[in-house]
Amino acid sequence: MSNVKITIPADFILGAAASAWQTEGWSGKKEGQDSWLDAWYKNDRHVWHEGYGPAVATDFINRYREDVALMKQAGLTHYRTSINWSRFFTDYEKGVIDEEYAQYYDNLIDEMRRNGIEPMICLEHYELPAVLFETYGGWASKKVVELFVLYAEKVFARYAHKVNRWFTFNEPIVVQTRVYLDALRWPYEQNTHKWMQWNHHKNLATAKVVKLFREKGYSGTVGCILNPEVTYARSSAAHDQQAAQIYDLFYNRVFLDPLVHGEYPQQLIELLKKHDIKWDYTEQELAIIRENTVDELGINLYYPHRVKAPSRAWNPETPFHPAYYYEPFELPGRRMNKSRGWEIYPRIVYDMAMRIKTEYRNIAWFVAESGMGTENEAQFRNADGVIEDDYRIAFISEHLYQTLRAREDGANCQGYMLWAFTDNVSPMNAFKNRYGLIEINLQNNRERRAKKSAHWYRTLGETHTLQLNVDDEWK
């Protein structure tokens, strides 16, 4: 280990992220404005840790001024959140805006700007309106693509003069993977055909929104926030290398390639055909995707994904799943976040950065989420009542170091954003694992209190310097 000091460039983003549904709560929500998340919670509440869900969340919708003041106190340069599509309209087909909810966003964005914090807005962070899921099957339908573009048009018309950086989706692969590929979330349907259809329609929706934004002549950028799983093979043997390549194809390149290069990988199309996966697309849709690639990417990075060649026979009665080609592999001796069950391997940031540099035209990007979720954080509270989260400071330091090192080596990386600004609700885990710079006390009216990491994060921006001990192999 060596002590290293590295400079943080003056224009480098040091921000934090959240979403509407994980923070706002249901205060002021009207009949018929449920999202898919709300419907899941109402239909399947028992799977959410201690019954917490999006109903109250952190009550950000009523406490945003207090929270923006805390953002400034923590030294955030940027804050990324979403607009809740399910709440922005009272009529999704006609595009009738809920004025009360829209005004809240006018006020929030203005408050952030007054405090010197740049807003970054995502149009969909799992907040598909429940009625569109129930009526059309959600993103399985081309009608929903049209309605999403209508939603984007209304949002841009209202806020484009206030917000310069827009993102169509956060982690567009996640919902359909959990629902239709793995059948782990409500309504639990293993259907690989629907999984690929959702992927395609989200790629198409992104391209159409990019096209709309440019045709309207708005200033700013439109991107997408992905969660590529940085994938490592167990060994250099050909069968393990193939397992990693195919995993990457299905979970990463299915969005990376069309968003940045404008086309799906040919190998992916051939494998879907080989396994008789039916998904509806047209040459016109492929042309729209080809001609309207994104301006930038946000990349969410938490842990590595390791795979090996499968060692078991595939049940012929089981519908096709990409796991036909791989099995998970657990690296012996790996560092672990035991609360979350995730490996800690900061090198994923550097490796992803170099891949974007060499394979994805060195497109502008930033770390859009990176964070350390910890259970029972109250055990680290000191005599003054402050949570001493040195483990979070170490996690951020190591991942931020890899980000800055990649930038020095030519990666077009614009910054690092922490998940999350405050503790907030996660799908199923609710408040079980805490991620925030700011503590949310559920036993005391959701009182906010800065953790040790919040004060440390502020010093990063003030000194423009990161200092830490790193493994010599990373230097």
Image (tube, rainbow, N blue to C red):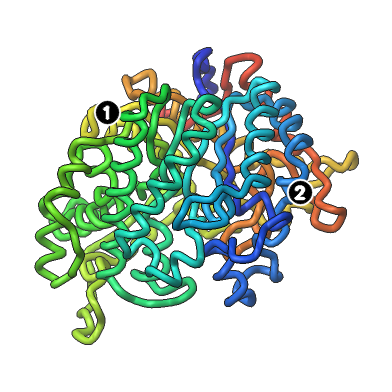
Residue farthest toward the right in the current orientation of the protein: 383
Task: Give me the residue at 45% from left, 52% from top.
Answer: 334
Judging depth in this view, the residue of 337 and 119 nearest the camera is: 119
What whole-number distance in Å separates the C-alpha atoms at marks 2 and 1?
38 Å
Question: Is mark 2 in CB contact (under 8 Å) with mark 1?
Answer: no
Q: Position of residue 165 (x, y in %)?
A: 46, 29
Provide residue 147's location: percent of width, then percent of height. 40, 53
Name the quadrant of the C terminus.
top left
- Which quadrant of the structure image shows residue 18? top right
Q: Mark 2 points at which residue?
A: 440
* Front one among 112 and 341: 112
The residue that appears at 76% across and 30% down in the rendered structure is 69
Q: In this view, does 61 lie to the left or right of 239?
A: right
Of tags 2 and 1, the one toward the viewer is: 2
Asked whether the viewer can see residue 229, the reply is: yes
The residue pinned by badge 1 equals 357
Question: Residue shown at 44%/54% (left/top)?
Answer: 333
Number of labels in the image equals 2
The kind of residue on which mark 1 rests is: Lys
Q: Above or below — where is 471 with respect to 104?
A: above
At 71% from the left edge and 46% from the top edge, which residue is drawn? 61
Q: In this view, does 200 lie above or below 215?
A: below
Image spot of residue 132 (x, y percent): 44, 64
On the image, which quarter does residue 191 sit in?
A: bottom left
If you read the primary sequence from the N terminus, does the residue marked by circle 2 or circle 1 appear first? 1
- Residue 395 in view of the camera: no
Q: Is mark 1 on a helix, strand or loop?
A: helix
Dot label at residue 464: none
Picture quadrant of residue 297 = top left
